[in-house]
Every structure is written in structure tokens, then in C-alpha cells.
Image (cartoon, rainbow, N blue to C red):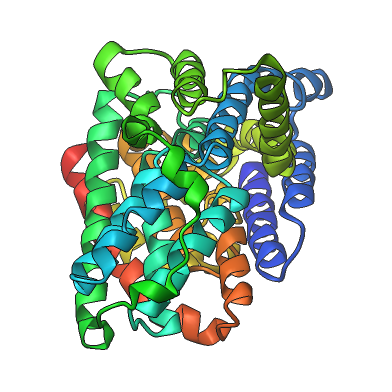
Amino acid sequence: MTSIIIGILLLLTFVGFIAFVMKGGNIMIGFLLMAILWTIIGGIPYKDAITNVFSKPALDYGSTIMVIIFGSWFGRVLVDTGIAGAISEQTIKVSYKRPIIATILICLVTSFIFTSSYGVGAVIAIEVILLPILRSLGLPKNVAITAFVMSIGAPMYVNIVIIKQLQLFFPKVVYGAKYLTYGFSAMAVQLLIVIIFILIHAKSIHKNDAKNISVDESTSKVPKIAYVLPIMPVFMNLAFHWEPIPALMLSIFLVLLITGNLKSYKSALELINKTISQAISDISGLIIMLLFLTMFSAAAVKDTARFSGILQSIVPHSPLVLAIAFGVLAPLALFRGPLMVWGAGSATAAVLAATGFFNQYFAFAAILVPGVSIAISTCITQSWNLWVVEHEKLDVKKFLITGVPFGWITSILNLLLAAVMFK
């Protein structure tokens, strides 16, 4: 009887946390409060809590934090050395003769860049180049923005910064061939939906006036061979089984070398210091939030036994049934809701992981898909989506109405894909 009462109290705080986040509450503080509440309500012994809830999980997560830092640094180096801009501006040459192909190419190029780049700073740097091109091709503002942000969202299925964050819940998931086979497949599915989205609006696309497009001449100095570097960390992992940090370090070195930024010791040092500082600044809040999240996750794992009976009755044990359920409910990832893993959905992820009902690769994908295809790709609460919408002065309601249906379709397809691939 006591366990049932405690289980009900834990679930009530879970619902309260979801409501708190969806009303705009600070998610970082929410994670810390949930860790404290679930420790107290769950009756976790004092010494156990101090060591195994509030200390060891955060310390153990340090290696993942380092990968996130190096990933953010690599993304910043790609932007500041001009590689991202140079890749983007190559699409201008196509936009006059083949506008529809150019529109699709812009979206593919955007996705390619963000297989490794991450953060609102990188998005801003690319947005000011590519979005004006999309608009000049005749795409309505809401269509251009939706295509652009969904193209950024697609590669988050393989972006190491994103994947490393979720490994907190599913430590058996390895960033390697098994997951990346699914990750690139899911990315391809979302890009296919983006292409269909573009073709639906193809009537509005027309030839571009090349004279009206300004090109940053500095990007012409970037060697063509540098265009493959955004994918280098993933290549090193797949081809040579390198760990993320050395793969990222090699990639950063090659970027600096090939773009000629190692010719002068002084200028190289200035660029390195600048990119490191900006990269850490981009993710500083994220790091603290993730550390609080590790504490909450640890408390959730210890408390699962308190409401395992309730979970046994409400959580389906079939991957296919869960995939369909999460697909239908995918819009609950909007506004940091219960299926948004970087929002209230972190509680869902913690509980799902703690049950042990599913293969970890499937459970990982199940909680990742709504977060990527709905929240990151179509929700206004994603930082760079908010910036783009405000910068372009697009009505928020129109942004959501335009993108969410396509994010929803993508979620359903990728969840079913996960159920098939991770049986």
C-alpha cells in the first residue's frame, strides 16, 4: 500500500513538472527540483542520495560533457573559418537556371553542414546566407523558414552533440555503425519529407535574379576539398572506429590547416581562443542543465520500483505498439511537452529507460524522434527556430501550422522505422 501511495505521488510530481515546463518554467531549475522531490518522496537513504544521486552521476557524465564541448567547438570552427558559408554560397550558382533543384540543394547543403555543427550561433551564420536565397526564389516566408529549420533538424539524428546527451538515459547505445545506420536512415526520411514539402509549393518557385544576390568574396578562398570536412568526425568513427574526441580534434586541425589558418602562430592562436570561447558560451547553460538532468535520472532509476506496477499496466511492451502510440502522440513534444526529451519529456525518458521493457536502441530512438522531428524541427521553443521566426518577422501560429504536420508525418515514419530496425 505504501509503495502505491508513493508511486502516485511520484506520478503527480511528474505531471506537475510537465505543467511547469509547458507554462514556461525554467527547465534547469525544474530538473534540480525533480531530483530533490523524487529523492525525498522515493525514500532514498541520505548517504545513497548524496553519493549516487547528486554526485556520482554528474561526475560520470563528465566524459560526455567533453564530447559536447569538442562538438560545439568543431561547429564554431566550421563557421568562423568560412567553410560553412562557402558550402552554402555554392548553391547560388545553381539558383538561376534550376530554381526548384536549387531550393532542394540548399536544404541538403544545410543538413550536411549540421551533421556536425550545432548551436544558435551556427544557425544564425548560415541563415543570413541561405534564407534570403530561398526567399528570392519565390518561396513564401513560412515555407522558406519551415524548409530551412526542418533541414537543420534532420541531421540532429546523427549529430554527436545531440546523441551524446541522450546516452545519459541509454548508456548501452553506442555512437557507431548500429545506431548510425538508423540515424542516417531517419535523417534521409526527414529530408525526403522536406523535398515533398518543397515540391508541394513548387508553383511559387521561380528563377532567381543573380544580380540581386550578394556573395561574400572571402568564402571563395576556401579550398573545395574543405567542403567534405563537416562529415569528417562521422567518417572517422565509421571507417576507423575512432572515439569522438580524437575524431573531432583531427577534424578541427584539418579545418584550420586546409583553410590556411595555421600559417601564422599569432592569428591561429587568436582564432583558436575565439572559437573555443564562443563554443563554450554557446553551450554553457546546456551543460549545467544536463548535469541536473543526470541527478534527476539517477533518482528516477532508483524510484522506478515504487511505481513499476502502474507502469506495467500502462506502458505497452510491444515496440510496434509503442512506436504507433508515440507517433500518434508526437505533437506532445511541442512546447517542451512530455515527449520532448530536452523538456518535460526528460521525465518520460527517465521512466522509459528505468522500466527496462525495451531494447535500449529502440527506446533511445523512440524518445529521440519526437524531440528531433517535432521539437527541434518545428517548435517555436527551439532557440534557433525562435530566432529565425523573430528575425524574419513570421507569425508564430503560421510557423507552427506550416511545419508541425510534416514533422508529425516524419515522426510516425521514423518511429515505425525504429521498431523495424531495432526488433
**Camera-nearest residue between 349 and 226:** 226
Give coordinates of residue 199: x percent, y percent: 19, 76
Residue drawn at (75%, 51%), measured in percent from left and top? 30
Residue drawn at (23%, 73%), measured in percent from left and top? 99
Q: In the image, 357: left or right of 256?
A: left
Give coordinates of residue 39: x percent, y percent: 75, 36
Residue drawn at (45%, 36%), measured in percent from left and top? 163
User: Can residue 208 be seen here?
Assistant: yes
Question: Quadrant where the C terminus lies?
Answer: top left
Residue drawn at (24%, 62%), measured in percent from left and top? 94
Give coordinates of residue 386: x percent, y percent: 61, 68
**Camera-nearest residue between 90 and 384:** 90
Residue 160 lies, with reference to residue 19, above or below; the image says above
Residue 83 lies, with reference to residue 138, above or below; the image says above
Give coordinates of residue 239: x percent, y percent: 25, 17
**Quarter occupied by residue 8:** bottom right
Q: How many marks?
A: 0
Residue 87 lies, with reference to residue 331, above or below; the image says above
User: Can residue 292 be seen here?
Assistant: no
**Camera-nearest residue between 391 and 309:** 391
